[in-house]
Amino acid sequence: MSNVAQAPPFPNDVPTHPLFVIDYALIQGGDEIERDRLWQAATQLGFWYLKEHGAEAEVEAMFNMGKAFMELPLEEKMAYEEGDDGEQFGYKAAGFHTADEHGTLDETEFLDVAKDDVLAFPAPVHRTYPPLVADAIPTVLRPFMRKSLAINHTLLGVLNDKLGLKEGTLADLHRTKEKSGCVARVIRTPPQNGKDKEALERQALLGAHTDFGSLSFLHNRVGGLQVLAPGTEDWMYIRPIPGHAICNVGDSLNIFSGGLIRSNMHRVVSPPRAQAMFERYSLAFFTRPHDSVVLRPLVPMASTPDGAETIQEDKGTAGEWLVRRLKYLRTGNYNPLTKLSCKGVESYTAHLGTEDYGKITQVAAPDAAVGA
Ligand SMILES: O=C(O)CCC(=O)C(=O)O
Ligand SMILES: [Fe+2]
């Protein structure tokens, strides 16, 4: 166990939302039942646990590198700040994203390292990184990314088949060699002690959002991640389970699937109870379509329960989608008086993705799910 996991275990008396547990070894072996369960998880909530993924050692090394980076002096990190133009790689300081439509500041720091920079290293594709991060590219970042990419591509292959798409269709929209927004992210939030209970329950440290790309491979050590399940109004914690990654679907895959595969709302709040007194670290790898891919449905569109079609037209390219979503999350583009960005576009709502499309499938209690 690394030194990022000092907090006590997630409490047993805090309500949590159950998730399917998908066994990656069975998926790799082509097990039909497990492939069906992955499809159910992806279409019902769009979140599942993944066990037997074989990336634990790489994840651990990433946490240790990420912690060393986060402990650098703020001014060193600020030299790599992502800025207000939709740049998605580098460092995002706390308070630089709005956490809600009122312009509340987020409390989350990111280290975002591009897949393209890691695979082409030492040649920079998008940007350079602090020496501590650059030095870790061959030994830490590259092994983590290679595993994450392989896992997400295997899962995409299953979803490709279940959608009835010609073999390789989704793979062809996520070509590793093309420039993309694929990124490894280390996430830190500060200890939350000293805040009153109500503030803790109310305040998002990372605002409610859907992910921008296709598949996210997430590693939580302490609580804080919450989902808003379809048909419900209460945010529910997801329980971190040792050795289990949390996988979730993002907007691009939701759009490709005509709304069938769900990109669900989630956020980060204070870890519960005694865990709140500790820093929270988490780690994600986001697989996103390459930048030039046009986001549009590839299968007939799903309908909402009242029959209304949800995804009407193409949404521009994956690259444009990312820039728009990131840019209008930036505090620097938010005007607290008019809620208009400096450039005269509605700011917070201008960043939104497929959050409105999530009313397609009713969530059923997953079988054999744990975490509740
Ligand atoms: O830290 C987490 O558990 C989730 C982070 C997240 O949702 C994101 O970075 O998109
Ligand atoms: Fe997310």
Image (tube, rainbow, N blue to C red):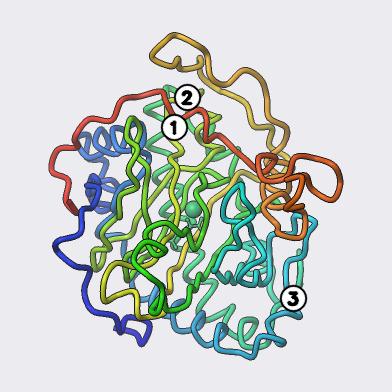
As helix, strand or loop, the secondary structure at mark 3 comes to loop
Q: In the image, what residue occupies the spot 37% across and 59% down?
A: 201
Name the residue tied to disc 1.
160
Q: Is residue 266 left or right of residue 15?
A: right
Amino acid at pointer 1? Asn
As helix, strand or loop, the secondary structure at mark 2 comes to loop
Category of crowding for the residue at label 3, using alpha-carbon neighbours closer than 10 angstroms: few (below 14), some (14–19), many (at least 20): some
Q: Position of residue 256 (x, y in %)?
A: 54, 29
Category of crowding for the residue at label 2, using alpha-carbon neighbours closer than 10 angstroms: few (below 14), some (14–19), many (at least 20): some
* Distance Cα–Cα, label 1 vs label 3: 35 Å
Amino acid at pointer 3? Thr
Amino acid at pointer 2? Leu
In this rendering, the answer to whether 69 lies above or below 355 is: below
N-term mark: 2 or 3? 3
Name the residue tied to disc 3.
128
Q: Is residue 303 left or right of residue 56?
A: right
Q: In the image, what residue occupies the spot 61% across and 71% down?
A: 94
Q: Nearer the viewer, residue 179 or 197?
A: 197
Q: In the image, what residue occupies the spot 37% across and 70% down?
A: 196
Q: On residue 165, which mark appears?
A: 2
* Mark 3: C-beta under 8 Å from nearest atom of ligand 1: no
N-term mark: 1 or 3? 3
Q: Position of residue 229 (x, y in %)?
A: 34, 38
Do the residues bearing badges 1 and 2 touch, measured as CB atoms within 8 Å?
yes
Q: On residue 202, which mark appears?
A: none
Q: Position of residue 290 (x, y in %)?
A: 66, 46
* Mark 1: C-beta under 8 Å from nearest atom of ligand 2: no
